[in-house]
Amino acid sequence: MEYSKNALISVSDCDTFLAELARIKSNLEFRMTSSERQVVNIAAQSTELPERLAEIDAQISHLTEAAAVIQEGPNKSALLVSVSRLQTKKLLIADKADNYTSSDLLLKQYDINRINQDLAEVAVLTAAIESRKAELAA
C-alpha cells in the first residue's frame, strides 16, 4: 500500500509518528510473545489432559471396586471420600480440557500470522517515514 508520507511536513512530525510506530511495534511484539507461549501451552495441554483424565478414571474405577467389597466403616468412608474428590478433580480437568481444543490452537496460530503481517507493515511504514524524514532534513 502506498502511504501519504508527504502529509508529514516537518522532521518533528516524522519523529512523532516514528515514536507512535515504535509503540505499536512494541505492543505487537508483546502480543507475539504471548501468543507463541499460548500455542505451546495449548499444544502441551491438549495431549496431557486426556491422559490425566484416563488416569483419574482408572483410579475412580479401582477405588469404587474396592469400596464395593469393603464392609461399612472408616476405611470404606475414606475410599468413598477419595472417589468423590477424584470425581471433582475429573470435572475440573474436563472443563480445562474444553479450553484447549484444536480450534483454539488454530485460532492462536492465525493470530500469530496476523501479527507477523502487522509487524511487516509497520516495518514498511517506518522505512517510508524515515525516508520522508531524510528528505525533510536535507
Image: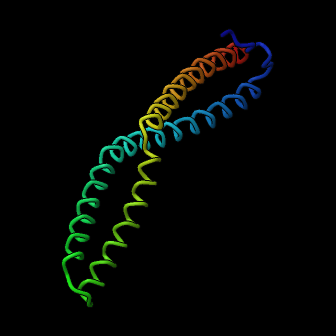
Judge by depth and name the residue closer to the eye, 126 or 97: 97
Judge by depth and name the residue closer to the eye, 45 or 91: 91
On the rendered structure, is 98 left or right of 7?
Answer: left
On the rendered structure, is 117 left or right of 72?
Answer: right
* Residue at x-position 24% and y-position 64%: 61
Point out the residue furthest to the bottom here: 73
Q: Position of residue 74 (x, y in %)?
A: 26, 90
How many discs appear?
A: 0
Q: Position of residue 124 (x, y in %)?
A: 58, 17
On the rendered structure, is 87 left or right of 107?
Answer: left
Judge by depth and name the residue closer to the eye, 33 or 128: 33
Judge by depth and name the residue closer to the eye, 102 or 86: 86
* Residue at x-position 65% and y-position 10%: 1
* Residue at x-position 41% and y-position 49%: 97
In which quadrant of the rendered view does residue 40 lie? Answer: top left
* Residue at x-position 23% and y-position 71%: 63
Q: Position of residue 54 (x, y in %)?
A: 27, 54
Point out the residue furthest to the top here: 2
Task: Indicate the quadrant containing the C terminus: top left, top right, bottom left or bottom right.
Answer: top right
Q: Position of residue 35 (x, y in %)?
A: 48, 39
In the depicted structure, whether residue 94 falls above or below residue 122? below
The colour scheme used to paint the residues is rainbow
In the depicted structure, whether residue 11 falls above or below residue 99? above
